[in-house]
Each structure stands twice: as structure tokens, then as C-alpha cells.
Image: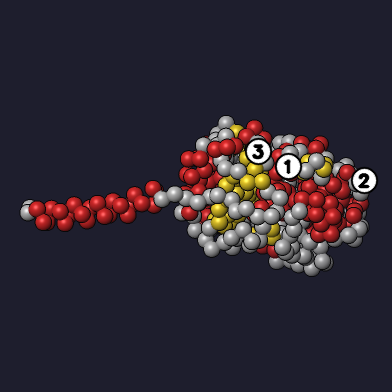
Amino acid sequence: MNDRRLKSRCGAVLAAAAILIAPACRQVSYTPLAENDGWEISDPQRQGIDPDRIETAYREAERLDTIYSLLVVKNGFLVAEGYFNGRNGSMASPTASVTKSFTSALAGIAVREGLMALDQTLPAFFPEIDWATADARKAQITLRQVLQMRSGYPWEEADGYLTTLFGRGNWIPLLAEFPLMADPGARWGYSNLMSHMMGIVVSRAANRTLLAFAQEFLFAPLGIEAASWPRDANGYYYGMGDMHMKPRGLARFGQLFLDRGSFHGRQVLPAEWVDASFEVYSPSTYGREIMASIRQLGYGYFWWSGTCGAHAIRYAWGHGGQMIAVARDLNLVVVATAAPQPGFDAESWRHESAVLELVGRLIASL
């Protein structure tokens, strides 16, 4: 081979290698923007995090085609923030079932205010149901069992009631129509119906809309807001999902739980409620592991539990990859939002689990 051809071939090889290497060498931007919203800004290294671990996570996030945001809060400082796939920090994201954890917090406030008690049963809040002709066990379901997802009502996705549920505008009659799949308190089963009913319970106990109650007792104290929050056919805000919020607002909510209900010296939530919400009442929800980086899935009061490597986490989890993860031993909050997924099939789970696994790997690496 003559020198000219050798140089030409070597040049082509080096150029191709440069294309492959360049993305890995290019620095990823995750520096939080300075905004007048109360967040103190720092960087990972100052807060005891290896920047390379953050760099790796944000580089992985750039390769995901459905992730919207990734935020990391360490020691109360926002140390990393990134937006992807055309999103930015001013855009509110659909939180899906992360909303349930907000409903749980509002239930805790209602209990603190003396508006309701966890030992109360469903008939106290739904007089329109003919409990006398319903399964007698239903009248014994307590609010505590609802929050623990141990009511006995169907796990809609697993038990085949999902289409019926979302095909109805008025869910209250389903309290009578849906059968119990287990005795109340006997086993865990994820119920969108019952988490929405919890939102209605809080609204009826407070004698105001769930949004109005949230604005006074939760949103205003934290300086956050729901950009939108859909309502059912009866005008009740969904206690089970679909509230829209900016990622920084979700991070503030996570920080509230990390700090056991305290925010800027004010006890917004009772510390005991936060602790009770983080208790593990169902240590094995799926009965098997469904992720590689988040293991030992359990459940508290509308909060999930799990482990990421050596770290125990509690997290709010929404379909599509919405997540607020709290790791007390690391003094850490991680927020991820992602595009909503239209179904519950393998393709939707592929997108959703990619975001969840990203967060799990990040926490496990710290």
C-alpha cells in the first residue's frame, strides 16, 4: 500500500474514532439555573458527591428519548438539574401516580387538623352507597387500610378492572360494584379507585375542594403550585393521579419528606405522619423483583420503598417514569419526570423502567 492510500485510510479511521469518542468526551451540562424560587444552588463536589457519578447519570439521560427532567438535591442544595427532549424548567409535567403521595400528605394534614381519623371507615364518608346490601366487609375498610393499599379492592391492572375503571366518569358507584379480592388488611393490591376515594374523603372532611385544601396547607407553605389538576365527573380532583407540577416543585415536596415535614422552620406536615408514610406495611408488593437497580419493593402510605445498592429509599412513583426519590442516609432527593405512556404494555414499561433504572443506578453509585 502506498503512503498516500495509507494516510487516507488512517485518516478515515481516526475520523470515525473521533465521532465515536467525541460524545463520551463532551462535557454534559447539569449546572442548576439561578432562579428566584428559594432554592440554594451548589455543586456536587461541595456537597460530597463525586461529579463523575452525576456526569454519568446525565450522559445516560441524554440517551433516553422519553425523559423530561433530572434533578438532584443534596444537603438541601440543588446540585444538578437538566432538561431533555425539548423540555425546560418552566414546563409543568404530568405526575401520574406521584399525585398519590400528595394525596397522602393532604390526608396527614386533615388528620392533624382533626377533620378525620385513620380508624374511620368508608361509610362515614360515602353515605350515598347502600352499605347494607354491599359486601359486609366493605363497611369495615378503614382509611389506614386505604392508604396502605390493603383495602381488598381490585388491583385494577392485575385483576382486569383497569378498562372498566377508566371507562367511567363517576367512580363512586364502583365502591359498590367492584368486588373485594381479599379481606380488608389481608394483602396488598394497588388500587387507583381507592386512592381517588381518599382524595374525596379529604375533600369531604375539609368541606372544600382538594385543590383549595392543598393550596392553603401544602402548596402555599412550600411556594409551589399545581399547573393543572383534572377533576372527575362529580368535580372532585383526582386523588390518584394526573396533577401537573414543575420539577422543582416536585423536588421541594421530596425535600419536605426528607426533612420530616419541616420547611424553613415551619412544620408543614407532622413528623410522625412522614415517618408513618415511610413505614413498610407491605414488604413484598409484586412478589418478585421487577427492576435491577431498585430492589425489595414495599409500600407505606401511598409511598413506595426499595433499596438502591446499600441505600434504602422511599419514593413517589408515577406511570411513564415520574419519580421523587428520597434517601435519608444520603440526605438526598432525586426527581425525574418523563413523557406519559399511553398504555401498560411491554413498550411502555421499557420507557418507564429506563428512567427508574437511571435514578436507581445513580443513587446506588453514591
Residue pushed farthest left?
Answer: 2
State left or right for residue 150 relative to residue 96. right
Q: Quick one: 257 or 357, which is closer to the camera?
A: 257
Q: Quick one: 117 or 69, which is closer to the camera?
A: 69
> Going 56% across and 56% down the picture, which residue do you hit?
83
Mark 1 and mark 2 lie on one chain; the one further toward the N terminus is 2
> Going 91% across and 58% down the picture, which residue do you hit?
207
The image quarter in which residue 315 lies: top right
Tell me the amino acid under the disc marked 1. Phe
Mark 2 and mark 3 lie on one chain; the one further toward the N terminus is 3
Q: Secondary structure at mark 1?
A: helix
Q: Dots 2 and 3: beta carbons under 8 Å?
A: no
Task: Tell me the crowding category of disc 3: few under 14, some 14 to 19, or many 20 or more residues within 10 angstroms, Cα based.
Answer: some
The mark lying in front, picked from 3 and 1, is 3
The image quarter in which residue 274 lies: top right
The mark lying in front, picked from 1 and 2, is 1
> Going 9% across and 53% down the picture, which residue do you hit?
3
Q: Which residue is mark 2?
A: 114
Is 305 situated above or below 349?
above
Is 35 situated above or below 312?
below
Distance, label 2 to label 3, CA atoms, is: 33 Å
Q: Which residue is mark 1?
A: 257
Location of residue 363 in the rendering, given as x and y in whole percent from the top left corner: 56, 39
Location of residue 269 in the rendering, given as x and y in whole percent from the top left corner: 81, 43
Distance, label 3 to label 1, CA atoms, is: 13 Å
Q: Which numbered circle lies on residue 75?
A: 3
